[in-house]
Image: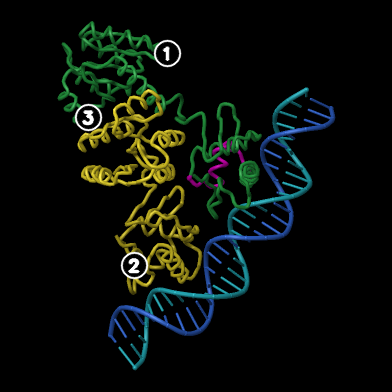
Chain colours: A green, B yellow, C cyan, D blue
Amino acid sequence: MSRILIIEDEVTIAELERDYLELSDFEVTIENTGDGGLDRALKEEFDLIILDLMLPGVDGFEICKQIRQIKNTPIIMVSAKKEDIDKIRGLGIGADDYITKPFSPSELVARVKAHLARYKRLVGSGAEHKNEWIEIRGIKIDKTARRVYVNGEEKNFTTKEFDLLTFLAENPNRVFTKDELFREIWDMDSIGDIATVTVHIKKIREKIEVDTANPQYIETIWGVGYRFKV
Amino acid sequence: MSRILIIEDEVTIAELERDYLELSDFEVTIENTGDGGLDRALKEEFDLIILDLMLPGVDGFEICKQIRQIKNTPIIMVSAKKEDIDKIRGLGIGADDYITKPFSPSELVARVKAHLARYKRLVGSGAEHKNEWIEIRGIKIDKTARRVYVNGEEKNFTTKEFDLLTFLAENPNRVFTKDELFREIWDMDSIGDIATVTVHIKKIREKIEVDTANPQYIETIWGVGYRFKV
DNA sequence: ACTTACCTTAGGGGAGCCATAAAAAATCCC
DNA sequence: GGGATTTTTTATGGCTCCCCTAAGGTAAGT
C-alpha cells in the first residue's frame, strides 16, 4: 500500500481527494499548512505528495524546491490558475505533474497511479529496474519462475544457461567479451576458463536457435564477443 | 545533447516538432512508420521518445508496450483524441506523459525538458549511455553494439575496420599518419606494414562512401595521412 | 615528362578465434 | 553413496579475418 501526503489548506478539497484515494487503497495523510506539510514531507517517507500551490505560510513553490533537495518523491502540483502552472513548469522546479482546479477526482487518482507506477519502474524495487518478463522475438524469459519459452514452447535451462541468456537478453544489442560475461555470471575472482562461456553459448543456441550455424538471437562478433540481437 | 526519437506518420507535424526541439539543442530523429520506429527505439539509444498513437502498421499502444519490456526511456504519447488519452492512461501501459493535438510546440518542448530532467534525477547521471553513439552526416556508429549504419542501412564491419573507423570518427578533422593509426589500432610493438592501414581504409571506404574515388568521409591528406571530415 | 606517393586489386599463408564433441570433474538429488 | 545432471576442462578441426605481397594504375608535385 502506498502512502500519500496531501498538502492543501482548503479542507473540503483535501478531504475529497482523500476519499477518492482511499477508495483505491492508498493511505492518505493531510496537512493544512505549508510549514506542517514541508516538515512532514521531509521527516517521513511518502510514496507521493500532492501539493497545492497557494498556501498560507511557506508556498508550494518553496516546498517543492526544499523537498527536491532531499528527496525524489513524486510531487503533483495543484493550482487554481492555469497561468501559474505554465510559470512553474517553465521554472523547472522539479514537480512531476501539474493539475488545475477544478479537476475530477478520478483524474487525480489516475495520475497518482501513473506516477507511482513510473517511480517504481525507474527507481524500482531494488537496483534492477527491469521487468520480471523479457520477451524478444518469440523468446520469452520469466525471471521469477526462471522459465524460458521459445515460440510458446517451454525449454529446460540449467542455472548457468538461464543466467547467461537472461543477462544477454537484458542488455540487448550490446557486445560483451567472454571475459565480461564470465565475470558477470560467475564470481569475479573465480579463476576459470572463459571457454566455459563458449560452451554455454552453444548449449543456449541449441535451445533457442533454429539453425545454430546461423544464429538469429545470440550473435558472434568475431574477435570481440557475443551479443543478443534485437 | 539529448537524443530524441519522433515516431509520427504525419510528416509536417513531425518536422514541426523537430524544428522546435532542435532550437533547444536536441538531436532529433524521425521515423514515419510504427515498425520503423519500434525497430529504431529498440536498437538505438534515445533519451526520450515522442510517440503518435495513430500509426500505420504497429500502433502506438503496442510500440509503447514493447519498448517498455526492454527500456525505461521516457515516452510522451501524442493523440488527436482526448478520449484515447483517457483510455490509455487507464490501461497503464507505461507512457510517461500524454499530450493532445493540437498542442503548442513550446509546450511540447517544455514537457520534453521536464521529463528529461526527471529521468536524469531518478535514474542518475545517465553516464551509461553517453558516448556510445557517434553520428556524422549519415554515418552512425554504435559503439556498444559495434554496428555501423550508413544512411540507416546497417553494414557489416570486421573488428579492425570497426576500430579504425571509430577511432577516426571520434577524432574528426584531425589528420593521422598511417604510423599513428597503426600504433593506435594495432599493438604498439607489433611490427607491421603500414600498408595494412591503406588496405583497411579502402575496405571501409567501400562500405561508407558512395564513390570511393571521391571520398566524402575519410579524406586523404597527401603526404601526411587520413582524416575523417566533418 | 618525371618522380613520388597513394590507390586498387587479388591471392595466399598464417594466426587466432570459435564451434563442436567428448571426457572429466563437480554438484545435486534422491 | 550412487546415479543423474550440470558444469568445467580439454582437444580438435574448421573457419574467419588479418596481414603481407606485388604489380599496375592514378593522382599530385616539380
Q: Nearer the viewer, residue A19 or A35?
A: A19
Indicate the amino acid at tag 2: Glu
Q: Secondary structure at mark 1?
A: loop
Mark toward the viewer: 2 or 1: 1
Left or right: B112 in relation to B45: left
Q: Residue at x 48, y 71 (%)?
A: B193
Q: Secondary structure at mark 2?
A: strand
Q: Disc 2 to disc 3, how far (Cα)? A: 45 Å
Left or right: A140 in relation to A119: right
Res B83 → quadrant: top left
Q: Nearer the viewer, residue B20 or D11?
A: B20
Q: Disc 1 to disc 3, how far (Cα)? A: 30 Å
Q: Which residue is mark 2?
A: B219
Q: Which mark is residue A1?
A: 1
Q: Secondary structure at mark 3?
A: loop
Q: Which residue is mark 3?
A: A92
- Sequence-first tag of 1 and 3: 1
Magenta segment range?
Answer: A173-193
Residue A62, how many percent across, how many down? 19, 20
The image shows residue A166, relative to residue B155, as above or below, that is: above
Query: Disc 3: which chain?
Result: A
Q: Residue at x 20, y 9 (%)?
A: A9
